[in-house]
Amino acid sequence: MSNSEYLKRNAAPPSWMIDRKIRTYISKPNPGAHALDRALPIGNVLKQLGVAKVAREIKKSMLANEVIVDGRRVTDPRFAVGLFDTIELPTMKQAFIVGIDLKGRITITPTKETKHKPCKITGKHVVPGGKLQLNLIDGRNLLVAKDSYKVGDTLVLDVPKQDITKHLKLEAGAKALITSGRYVGHTVKVTAVEGSMVKFAVNDTTSETHKEHTYVIP
């Protein structure tokens, strides 16, 4: 069994909601857009949703029926899905979104919104020709003409076309999801941004975290 394709279940990230006593190994997502502890292979998700029970059935089902992630069809059971990715199963007339719960575990919940996706800006730099390239949290890169964006802001994209429909700034008054730490999974109100730290209010309490753990949402 290839080490590149599987993990021992007891070595799987705590964010994966799996029964560690049923099988010794579990599929590992392909490297790419999402970090290992923030991603699940789409095949495991389909098992969780009851589409099929074993790997062979998953692969057969994905080839026979459409599985759409962020507006594009995928056929690889190890394709990685992560935070705010949408999964459509047209033959079942169902759609789901990837999230996190209050324990930092990856969740798959029903959704009706599959055309717009919030993507956090994780980096930016000027490319030859003078345009600005924005690096997004899910591995996307966008070229923009004006420098009105900051690392930590969120772009709402029309997927799969990648047109920017909204620019959500990381600033006082913004709504944000906390992605790590004591308040992981909580939706909070940003009260101030000071350097690399973000102050926020949640449940009548004030706290702060690093920008890296704050995700502005619509």
Image (cartoon, rainbow, N blue to C red):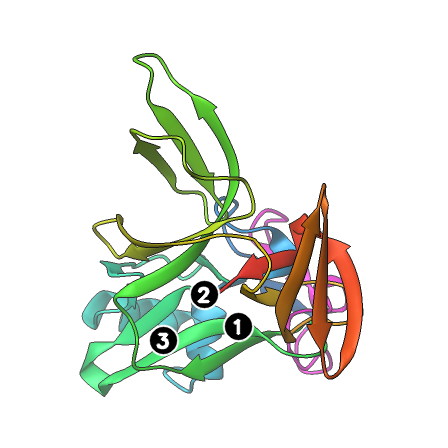
Return the disc, 3 or 2, that comes first in the chain's sequence: 3
Percent x, y for residue 86? 36, 68
Query: Which of pointers 2 and 1 lies earlier in the amino acid sequence?
Result: 2
Out of 113 and 50, give the one closest to the viewer: 113
Q: Position of residue 101 (x, y in %)?
A: 63, 78
- The residue indicated by pointer 1 is 99
What's the amino acid at mark 2? Phe
Q: Residue at x 63, y 63 (%)?
A: 190
Of 11 and 177, which appears nearest the observer?
Answer: 177
Decide: is 44 above or below 31: below
- Vertical comparison of 98 with 138: above or below: below
Highlighted range, magenta: 1-23
CA separation in Å, label 3 and label 1: 26 Å
Would you say the residues marked 3 and 2 are in contact, meaning their CB atoms lie under 8 Å apart?
Answer: no
Which mark is drawn over residue 84? 2
Q: Which mark is residue 57?
A: 3
Residue 16 visible in image: yes
Q: Secondary structure at mark 3?
A: helix
The three-letter amino acid code for the residue at tag 1 is: Gly
Indicate the quadrant where residue 65 lies: bottom left
Circle 3 residues within 10 Å: few <14, some 14–19, many ≥20? some
Locate residue 167 relative to residue 210 in the image: left or right.
left
Q: What is the secondary structure assignment of the residue under circle 1?
A: strand
Instruction: Kindly report the distance in space between the C-alpha atoms of the residues bearing marks 3 and 2.
Output: 26 Å
Does the magenta segment cover residue 188? no
Q: Secondary structure at mark 2?
A: loop
Closer to the camera: disc 3 or disc 2?
Answer: 2
Q: Is residue 118 above or below residue 93?
A: above
